[in-house]
Amino acid sequence: MNKLFMSLAGVGAVVAAAIVATFSGAQALAEDKAPVILVVDRAQLIAQSRAGKTIPEQAEEVRESVAAELEAEAKKLQNDIEKYQKSASLMSDEVRQKTEQELAMRQQYALPQRVQIMDQAFRAAVQNAETKILIEARPILKDIVDDRGATILIDRSAVMYASVDADITEEVIEKLDKKMKSVEVQKISLAEVEKQIQELQAQQAENQ
């Protein structure tokens, strides 16, 4: 479960450490030096890097696989409903009522919940792949900051304007492409996701 569903707090910590950093700021101020600020566009690092460009096609394959599984679940439910409708008159009141409740539960709660769970799992798989790129870019960012004697590195989304010289995105992408050719988008299945959820719930119950 932990491999698939990285906590938002964990991802946020990685991104913050990789993208928004302050280097030797106190020392620079003590020496009365103006801070040297660099800017990087993390969204562009993902979208334009060689590894990042391998994400969309993989993501689409995962999405199609998820859609096929959910469609099969919906079809199975519809078949069970039709089967019940044909044989309901032959059932006892108790069995008929129990079957109706079970089918209603699957239709109103179980299937929509599975759709939601798989959507979350899909988003997590893509986000995890993107985070791997940012993690790989972290030492590159540090090297550039050190080489330029910068004191602050800021994500482009937090900046209204920056000079061309201050934006190191293209330089980072060029170096990143030499280190990282591709990144894997984890494949997911309904059975595996539900298994991981059950394991997590069991662990949580043990810790209570």
Image (cartoon, rainbow, N blue to C red):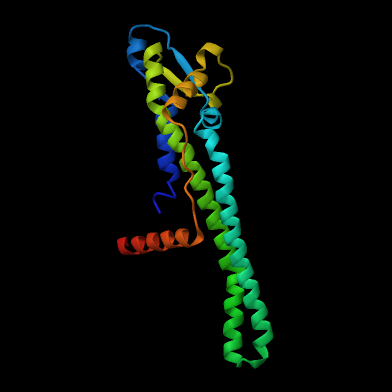
Across and down, in percent, residue 206 comes to 31, 64
Q: Say above or below: 116 vs 142.
A: below
Q: Say above or below: 79 vs 51.
A: below
Q: Quadrant of the C terminus?
A: bottom left
Q: Nearer the viewer, residue 75 or 114?
A: 75
Q: Residue at x 57, y 88 (%)?
A: 95
Q: Residue at x 55, y 45 (%)?
A: 59
Q: Is residue 31 left or right of residue 47?
A: left
Q: Name the residue furthest top.
A: 32
Q: Residue at x 44, y 12 (%)?
A: 36
Q: Residue at x 31, y 60 (%)?
A: 207
Across and down, in percent, residue 61 comes to 57, 48
Q: Can residue 122 be spotted in the picture?
A: yes
Q: Is residue 128 left or right of residue 142?
A: right
Q: Nearer the viewer, residue 151 or 126?
A: 126
Across and down, in percent, residue 159 comes to 55, 22
Across and down, in percent, residue 75 comes to 64, 68
Q: Nearer the viewer, residue 63 or 145?
A: 63
Q: For residue 33, which quarter of the picture?
A: top left
Q: Is residue 71 left or right of residue 118?
A: right
Q: Quadrant of the N terminus?
A: bottom left
Q: For residue 156, which quarter of the picture?
A: top right
Q: Can residue 22 be spotted in the picture?
A: no
